[in-house]
């Protein structure tokens, strides 16, 4: 039995996003400067298997979670009360040109300060974990779950 949906999501809410019949769990981390809901994608795991450590290691994306809850695409099912990570300090965005379908460069910048940025042509493993500064649609969210893009 799930927790009754609230008007507003709260930091630490665990939400089951309905993805083709299987719920994918996310943890709401808060709202991020113009990008909306910041969520840690935990994947198709049981509620009992979620811990602060698993949230810390999860891939972070931006997804209109409040809207998904409001229209029935997602349901609040639990809440973490401790060990919730802060919003990401760094973000990245792809360069404008593609080479073989991939960006030719990545721009890495501090949240809220795009002037302080650096450009790289190849992402290190740590840089690859920096959230992309794009907002996912529900279909985009489904694709990352189907590809197994989860911690």
Image (cartoon, helix red, strand yellow):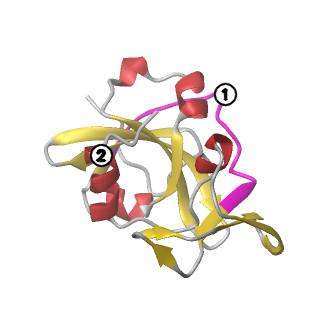
In the rendered image, the quadrant that contains the N terminus is top left
Q: CA distance from mark 1 to mark 2?
A: 28 Å
Q: Does the magenta-highlighted stretch encompass residue 84? A: yes
Residue 141 image offset from top left, x and y in percent: 34, 56
State the residue in front, 120 or 136.
120
Residue at the far left: name it: 21
Under tag 1, what secondary structure?
A: loop
Residue 56 image offset from top left, x and y in percent: 61, 32
Residue at the far front: name it: 100
Q: Earlier in the sequence, mark 1 or mark 2?
A: 1
The residue at which mark 1 appears reads as: 83
Looking at the image, residue 44 sits to the left or right of residue 96; the answer is left
The residue at which mark 2 appears reads as: 147
Residue at the far right: name it: 116
Residue 83 image offset from top left, x and y in percent: 67, 27
- Residue 82 in the image: above or below residue 125: above
Alpha-carbon neighbours of circle 2 within 10 Å: few (<14), some, or many (≥20)? Answer: few
State the residue in front, 5 or 83.
83
- Residue 120 in the image: above or below residue 61: below
Residue range in magenta is 75-91
Looking at the image, residue 60 sits to the left or right of residue 145; the answer is right
Q: Residue at 19% of width from left, 39% of height from top? A: 22
Under tag 2, what secondary structure?
A: loop
- Residue 29 in the image: above or below residue 112: above
């Amino acid at each position: 039995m799930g927790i009754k949906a609230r008007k507003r999501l709260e930091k630490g809410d665990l939400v089951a996003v309905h993805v083709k019949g299987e719920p994918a769990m996310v943890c709401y981390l808060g709202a991020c400067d113009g990008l909306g809901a910041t969520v840690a994608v935990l994947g198709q795991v049981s509620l009992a298997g979620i811990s602060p450590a698993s949230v810390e290691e999860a891939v972070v994306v931006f997804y209109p979670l409040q809207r998904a809850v409001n229209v029935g695409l997602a349901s609040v099912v639990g809440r973490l009360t401790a060990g919730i990570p802060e919003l990401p300090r760094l973000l990245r965005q792809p360069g404008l040109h593609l080479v073989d379908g991939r960006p030719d460069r990545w721009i890495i910048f501090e949240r809220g300060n795009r002037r302080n940025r650096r450009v790289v042509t190849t992402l290190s493993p740590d840089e690859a974990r920096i959230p992309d500064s794009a907002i996912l649609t529900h279909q985009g969210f489904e694709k990352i779950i189907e590809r197994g893009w989860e911690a």
